[in-house]
Image: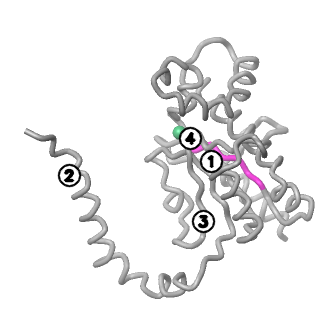
Amino acid sequence: MPDTKPKQTLLDILHGVKRFKEESFPERRELFGQLANGQSPKTLFITCADSRIDPELLTDQPPGNLFVLRNIGNIIPAYGNAMGGVTSAVEYAVCALKVSTIIICGHSDCGAMDALIHPEKTASMPAVRNWLQFAETAHAVTDALTATDVGPESIQALTEHNVLLQLNHLRTHPSVAAALARNELALQGWYYDIPNGKVYILNEETRHDMTVTEAISILEQQLK
Ligand SMILES: [Zn+2]
C-alpha cells in the first residue's frame, strides 16, 4: 500500500489555508487591504528555520511588520563569502526597505548548533556541513571558554556565541556598515528559550544576558 503520509500532511495544510480564508482573513481584511499596495517593515528578523519559532507570534507583530530571513542556524556569512539569498535579503532590507532594526534570534535545542558539536550527525548532508562552516568560529570560541562537556548549557553558550558571531558578520555587509555609520540602524542578538517562552537579549561587551524587561527599561530611558 502506498504511503499516505505526504497526502495527509498536504491535506492538513490545505485545510489550514481554507480556515485562514474563511476565519482569519475576514477579521483582518482591512490590514490585508493596506498590505496589498506594498510593505514597509521596520525590522529585519533573522532566525533559524526551526519550525518551533514563530517570529510574529513571539514578537506579537501583525503581518507586514517583520521582514523575515530564515535558514539553518540563523547564519549570515560575512560579506563576499557566500553571495546569494542571504546577502541579497540583507541588502534589500537595508537599502530598499530601509529597516531600522535587525534582530538575529538563536534558540534553545538548535539542531544546527548540535551538529557543530557533533559533526558526525551531518556526515550524509554535505550541503548542511558546508553551510555550518560559517558558524565554526562560534564553536571555537565556545570551546575555548567552556569546559569540555557538551551538556545543554554548552549548547546554549554556543548558540549565543553564534548569534554574536553572525552579528559581526552582518557588520561586514556594506549596506549594514553604511547604515550603522549613519546611525540609522540598530542591531540586536537574541536567545529564545523555547520551553520557557523567554527571550534574552545578548550583550557582547558585558557577556551578561539581559531580560526583555531590562532591555525595555533601558530603551525607554534613552527615548525620554
Ligand atoms: Zn535552529
- The amino acid pointed to by label 3 is Leu
**Secondary structure found at label 3:** strand
Q: Main secondary structure of the magenta part?
A: strand
Which is closer to the viewer, label 3 or label 4?
Answer: 3
Of label 1 and label 3, which has the lower sequence position?
3
Q: Position of residue 219 (x, y in %)?
A: 78, 61
| Residue furthest left in the image | 1
Which is closer to the viewer, label 2 or label 1?
Answer: 2
Of label 2 and label 4, which has the lower sequence position?
2
Residue at which label 2 appears: 7
Q: What mark, if any, has residue 105 been given in the picture? A: 1
Q: Are marks 2 and 1 in contact (CB under 8 Å)?
A: no
Q: What mark, if any, has residue 107 been given in the picture? A: 4
**Secondary structure found at label 2:** helix
Q: What mark, if any, has residue 66 been given in the picture? A: 3
- Spatial separation of the CA atoms under disc 3 and disc 2: 31 Å
- Spatial separation of the CA atoms under disc 1 and disc 3: 13 Å
- Spatial separation of the CA atoms under disc 3 and disc 4: 18 Å
Q: What residue span does the magenta drawing correspond to?
A: 187-192
Q: Are marks 4 and 1 in contact (CB under 8 Å)?
A: yes
Where is 144 relative to 24, above or below? above
